[in-house]
Each structure stands twice: as structure tokens, then as C-alpha cells.
Amino acid sequence: MYHLISMTAYEPDPEAMPWTEQYRVISFPEELRAGFMDLYRRRWRRREQPMGLPISKLNDLLRATAPGLVATGRGVGGSAEVPWFYASEEMPAELVAPLLASWVMTLPPSTESDAERVADHRDALDRALALIDQCTPQWRRESVDLTAAELSPGGTAQPDRRLYHLLPERIGAMLAARPLHLNGVDLSFRLVTRGQGVELVSWPPRMYTQGKRTWYYSGVVTVTVQTVPFAARIRVHVSYGIRRWATRSPVQLPEGRGATVLLDTPLPWPGANGSRRRLTANSLAFDRRLGMLAWSRQSLVDLLPNLDVLRVYPEPAELIAESVDWLEGRDGVAAGILHSTAMGPHGVGTGLMPLERSLLDRWVEDGLRPLLRRVSNLERAHRKSKPALLPTAQTKDSEKQETRSRQRVQARRDAVRAALDGQPLLVDVLWQTEETRDEVVAALREWLGLPPVLARVDGDHEWRVGDLRVALRARPLEVLGAPLEIDRGSGRSRAQALAEAVQKRATQLASQLSPRTAPVALAIVETLGPERFLAQDSDPKSALRHGCAAAGRVSQFIVVPEDAEGPVSLRARSALADGMRQLGAVVPPDQQLDEELADDLQYLALWHVRRQANGPTRQAGQQLVALLIRPHDLTHPVRGWDDARKEWVPYAQLLLTLATGGAAAHTRSGRATATTDARRDEVERQIRSLLYQVRNRPTLLLVNSGNLREAWPGLNNGQLARDMVTFQGEPPTRLALYGTDLRMVLLRDANNRGETSQWYAPGETKEETPGFSAGLWAAQDAGPDHRVFVSTVGKPPTAGTVRRDLRKLVSDDKWPHGPAATAWNPQALELTVLCCLSEAALAAAGRTDTTPDRPAVVAAAVHQLRFHDEYYPLSRPLPLHLAKLAEEYVLPLAPSAAPAADHNSV
């Protein structure tokens, strides 16, 4: 058992502060910005005008080709006041001018049939190009403290905004200047600028050969700047992983999807022999207008031939066909296509194991001294890591095994009875293969301990065990599982055409499902694999879910055996478990908190669903999902808030409402005419209303900051204050004003911004291999009112038996096939006890009727919610897990499509 964990996070060392760097800086001249905007606006005729220039492509070009450039500023396209270049030396005008000219050529409309407009665009382009010679940007010196930060009123460090891109670039350059020594091999790294921070990608790629196939991969190190609630110093988070390269011949791009390409190019200037430091990100996708693969408008690669006429740069079709040749390089130019799981299997597994992560982290730590230091190790904050789980059935003692199996079956039956309020459990199996049908029936029998019965001629089964009645109806799905037929005629938009096809199929399915004799039922639907649906938008799953919901069924999908990996029996059991979850037959186990929190404590979880126009139904929409769990309620312990009816409804009913009656509401709330402020006001109104609904009972509110803060800005770290909440345009107020026994915990995960760092458990001796450890953790010097904790879980059974000391980046003789192993990348959850019944909160409320909370116990309650008898440790606490999964039913349809007819009958 490990007693400490190490976070791959760093902070400024007070003894080395300030960390000051000198830069040569220029701003984007206003004359250039105005002239270029005049040209760029012509591309947006009859559309909403752009707020700024598409500067990212120019920045990529500068980073790839301009020696001495360190970083580019953010927001340059919309303001002439923002610094544009941060460089180690001035760049001559004769270098910058051709770069600007190449980029300016991409600003005007690419297609225009009107001769008069063509001439006008040409004149505007000539004027813009002339401006480049007329306006010479002025360089100035600027000193930047790379550790500069101010404390928010709540005590959280708020860095200078420039640091979010300057500091990762500087750290990346420092690390890339030092090779990484592993197993006698030196790995070199190149920088890749991201929207948030930088990546270091080991280059050139490494090769792994298995049989007759060679696979290519690299190590990747990501650096971002972050803040932590109530921490007085900024943080630098570093994460480690594997970057896999697509090298099939040809590379298979999934229908409707593109790919990211990293480009390695020499400096295009005569006599330029500087070392290469960067790879530039480009994207390619199928262009329907051209009828072929093409580089996206923001890609750099189509500008380089204008600057470097001596070399050949890859065309999309050529790169797809000859991916290995381009990855290995042609005449000094190399390009690699990033592999994605949608492209099929890859011979190199994902992830790194703890030993290799610790070796990489040691290399980073050495490279950052003495300017940054590692955040101190964390120790256990609560003695109980898990709730009171049922013992596993696996034991050599047959009598114990039988007893444990009976306990688990009884717990499942009780959960079903509570979720359905004593109504019968009705299950429809819509199958395409008899094998799957039979395994689903077997899984249901095993799940609830049902005896074998003979199916009737029509395929129906029925059981009665005590006061629990179970009925299963099996019918072939037949043509309802075929691809959707999308008709784009009559001037309909893509979303409208898809909505019509969805509604047609949904209505067909709903009419074939028999009338219900209970408030809600479950449908297990067997579908083809996604690769079978070659035509865009033809996958019928959204239509099938709409149809099941219209007929009063929650739905769970299972893929036909020939399109899926793994035994059908295991997948059928997993599908049934997910189906039971959708019925609400899942309750948290009893927690082990030394009776420090109220027995009748309820959990309120919020999740903000945001569907984009590229989502499953091609229609944007938003929905706030609120979930309430009362673990000890005998009926409907899991409920959701129906904002139209203004009441808490059973979880399954909430899902049906989201898919049917709520479809139009999603569309209205997400319409383009609604302003951001209006959407925020609506979400905050709903939150206030929800807090009012739970004010009379002890409640623990759970919120994922990254998910909700766009709609609730008061969740940003800089606005947090202990035991206070902030709504837009108002000063912070005590949470106790919304409920005397209300507590609130904010969760953060890594998301795509690296907001929580990776971790590993270090060995207590040099001989002990680093590993994983489940627990709730806090800083070793944390005081009694410490509010920020880290929640980790151990390795799940699905992670297999990969050894902790496995090495993948540079395999050794002991593990020659190490790169093929899939390693588990552990994710830590940050738990911030924002509000609790602290001494200060009780004193402010004038209360003496209860003892103060220990924040560590409140955090332990949330941590233990990640564990459940029926699931592997969850990525988030059960209430938030269920709230997030409800977004599977948020499937808004284009306004012209009417909802499917409701075939409910009770």
C-alpha cells in the first residue's frame, strides 16, 4: 500500500522568483489590421461580419519559418494593442514581408463569378499588399516576469494572461534543448503549439515491428499553465503519453472525419541552416465542393510552396497513399498523420506505466530547476478509501460464494423494485442475431437470479420472484436497423433532412413496440457497427433512441458479434447493467464516514449539456440536467428535475422527457438568436430554483467546474471564495442563504486543457517500483480548513496484467514487445470543498446547533461515490456520472421536424 502520491505538477520556486525574460516585441500595426480586415470582410458577404482576422494561420507560418521567434500573442486579430511577436532577436523586414504577403493572399474570397466584384477584390488585394511595404512594425524591448500573478479576493493566484502561452513555450524550449536518456537511447523533442500550452513530440518517430508489420510512434509531453483554487502560486501541469502515427497504405479516414498532420519543414530561406525546433499542426478532410481530400483553410502547408520553391510539399491524396514515405521524410520535408481509433487498430498501445512516467517526470524536474519546483507529495486525507461494498463472489469457499451471490442478487432486485416503485420490469430485446438475443436473456436471468423458463412460441419470457414480476419480449429488429435514407432535396438543410429521416424511422419503431403496461420499460437494441454506415449521417441509433422513447422505453445498444470485440456474453451483461442504470436501478452503497454527516444527506448533481451543430443530429441545443439521489428512499431514489413540470421525476422518466417532449426545448434554448448572456441568465435562474427546491434537507451539491463554468462564470477559480457562491453581476453571497444544511463540492478532471495533472505513487525505496493507489489525498501540510483534495482510484480489472515497470518509449530485452501493451493512464479528480458547515460559516449564520464540518470528510463522501458494487471505479462520482450520461438522450432535431408520435399507454 502506497502512502504518498506524486503529482506531475510544478510551481515557481520562491527562492528563484521573479523569473524574468527579456523579449523583442512588436504589435500588429493598426494600418495593416484595418487594411487586411477590409479585404477579409469580402469573404463574409451576406453573413455576420468577423470580429477579427484569422491570425492563427499566419502565426503558424511565423513559428515554423521565422528564426528567433519565441511565441505569438493571443487576440492579435482583433486588436492592434496586443503584442504580436515575442522574439529573442529582431527579425528583418525582408523576412517578415514575404510571410505576410503569402498569408494576405488567402484572405479574399476564393471563388467569385461576378467580373466587377473580381476586379474590386483584386484592387483591395493590391492595396493590402502595398501596405506591407508602407508600414514597418516597430520593435520594442519588453521584460516579462514568467511567474507574475495577483491574488484574487478568495486567495487564488491569477497569472498574467500572457503566461498561458509564454510560459509553456519557454518551458518547452528548455526541455527540448536537453535530450531524454532512456535505456541507452537519446530521444529528441520538437515543439507543437496548442490552443492551450505546448506539446513536445519525440522526433523522429520510433519504430516497433511485429511480424511483417512496422508501426510508428512517439512520446508526447504536454505543458500547460493552470491555477488551483485557493493556491497562492500558479501551477505548471505536465502530462505524458504516446503519440501514434497512421501508416496504413492507404490511410483509412472515417467517413465525414478529417485528420491532423504534423509537418516538419526546414527554414525556407537561402542559407538558413538553423536547427529545427518545431512541428506545425495541419488538418485535412474531404472537401465536398472539390470532391476530394484537401487541406483545411487554417492549414499552413498550402502556404509553404510559395516561400520554398526548391522543395515539394505533400498533397493530401499523396500523403494518404504514401504515409510511411512522408513520415520518414522526403528532401528534408516530413509529415505524419496522427492515428485515431476510428482509423482501426494500431500495433502500439496507448498510455505509459508508472515507472516510465516517473522517469519522464524526473527528466522534466531536472530541466526546470531551479526556476520551478515540484509540488510536494500528497498524503492520505481520510482513512477509508471505499464505501461499504458487497464482497465479491469469487472465493474458493463454495458456501461463501453462494451466500455472496445471493446478497448481490437481492441488492439488484431491491434496486429494481425501488426504481419502478413495485411495477413490473418490462424488457424488449430487438435483435439481429440469435446469439445476442440468447445472451441478453441469459444476462437478465443471471442479473436477477431468475430461474430457467421455456420461451413461448412468440419469444416472450415471464418470471415472478416474490413480489417482483419480470417480462421479456424478444423481436427481430429487421429493416429498422438499416442505414437511414437521407433526402437532401427541396432545399432542405442537412439538419432538416436528417431530422425527417430520424422521425420517420422513430415513428416506425414506436408503432411496432407493444403498448406498455408499466410507466417505463427497457429496450436492448442490437445494431450494426458504426463502420457499416458508410453514408454520412446514416447511423440509425439516434432514430432508434427517439422511437424507443416515444414508446416509453429507455434504450441500450449492443453491437452485432461480427462488428465488435470481446465475448458476446460479457457485452450482453454490460448492456444489461447500463440498461438497469437508465431505469434508475442504481443506488450508492452505504458510505464509511464515521457518522460525521447526516444520515438523510441527499446529493444534487448538475450537468450542462451542449450539443453542437456537428453532433449526432446536426442540431445545436443546450440543456441543464439536474439529478437528485436520496440513497435511503424506498421508491425512486434517483430522480431528475423536469423544468417544464416543475417537479422531481424518476430518472427513467427524465431520460424519456429529454428525448421526446424536451427536443423542442433544446432547440429553443440553443437557437442562434439567444445571446450568451441570456443563456447564462437562464442557467443561473434554474440553479437558484433548484437550490430552493432542496433547501429543507441536508444536501451536497456536486458540480463539474469545466462543464458548467461557461454558463455559471462564478465557478471560475478567480471568483471562488470559501463558503460563498457568486452569480453573474452580484457580489459573493453565503451559500447558507440558499439552504442551512447545503454543502457544495467542485470537481475538475484533466479534460482537454490538462486542468488536473497526472500522478503516480512513488516507491518508498529506490528498489520499489512506482505504481497506483486508490484514495483521497491532500497536501502534507494541510490545515483543518484545507479545501482542495485529490481523488484517485486503483487499476481497474480491464487494465489487464501489464507490469508497472513496463517500458514502451525505448523497449529493452526484457520487454521487446512493450510498445504493443496498452497502459492505463490514471486520471486524478480534483475535489474542492467550496462550501460546507465550517466554523466560519456557522459563526456567520449565528448557528450553535451543530458541530462544524471537517472538509476532508465532505471530500471523502464525494470520493466514495466513485465506487459501486456493479461498476468499476467511476471517472466521476455516481450522481454526476448519471447526470452526464443523461446527455445521451439530448438529441435535438431541426425545427421543421415534428416530434415522433407518443405511443405511450399505461
Image (cartoon, rainbow, N blue to C red):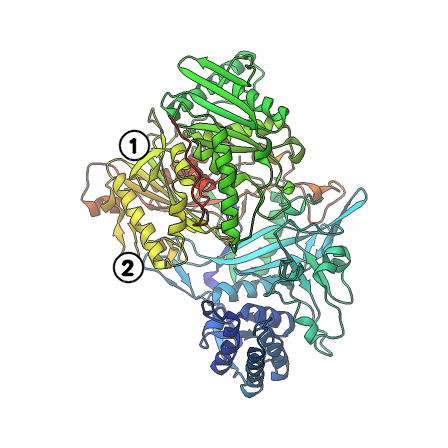
> In the depicted view, which residue is nearer to us: 232 or 749?
749
Element type at marker 2? loop
- Residue reaching furthest front? 490
Q: Are marks 1 and 2 in contact (CB under 8 Å)?
A: no
User: Residue tagged by mark 2?
Assistant: 729
Relative depth, front residue between 207 and 511: 511
User: Could you say which quadrant of the image residue 478 lies in?
Assistant: top right
For residue 314, what is the image quadrant? bottom right
Q: Distance between the residues labelled 1 and 2?
A: 34 Å
- Give the label, 1 or 2, closer to the camera: 2
Please, is residue 100 above or below residue 301 in the view?
A: below
Question: Which residue is labeled 1 in the image?
Answer: 598
Residue 362: image tag: none
Residue 168 locus on image (x, y percent): 54, 62
The residue located at (54%, 26%) in the rendering is 429
Farthest residue toward the bottom? 134
x and y percent of residue 62 in the render?
60, 72
In the image, residue 221 sits, relative to residue 838, either above or below, namely below
Label 1 SS: loop
| Label 1: few (<14), some (14–19) or many (≥20) C-alpha neighbours in 10 Å | few
Q: Which residue is drawn at 27% across and 45% down?
A: 689
Q: In this view, does 600 lie to the left or right of 475?
A: left
Kind of residue sitting beneath label 1 = Ala
Q: In which quarter of the image is residue 173?
A: bottom right
Q: Is residue 152 visible?
A: yes
Residue 310 in the image: x percent, y percent? 76, 74
Looking at the picture, does residue 905 appear above or below residue 820?
above
Comparing 221 with 586, the one in front is 586
Task: Estimate the x, y position of residue 230 in percent, counting from the top left.
Answer: 37, 54
Quarter of the image with the C terminus is: top left
- Counting residues from the start of the chain, the first of labels 1 and 2 encountered is 1
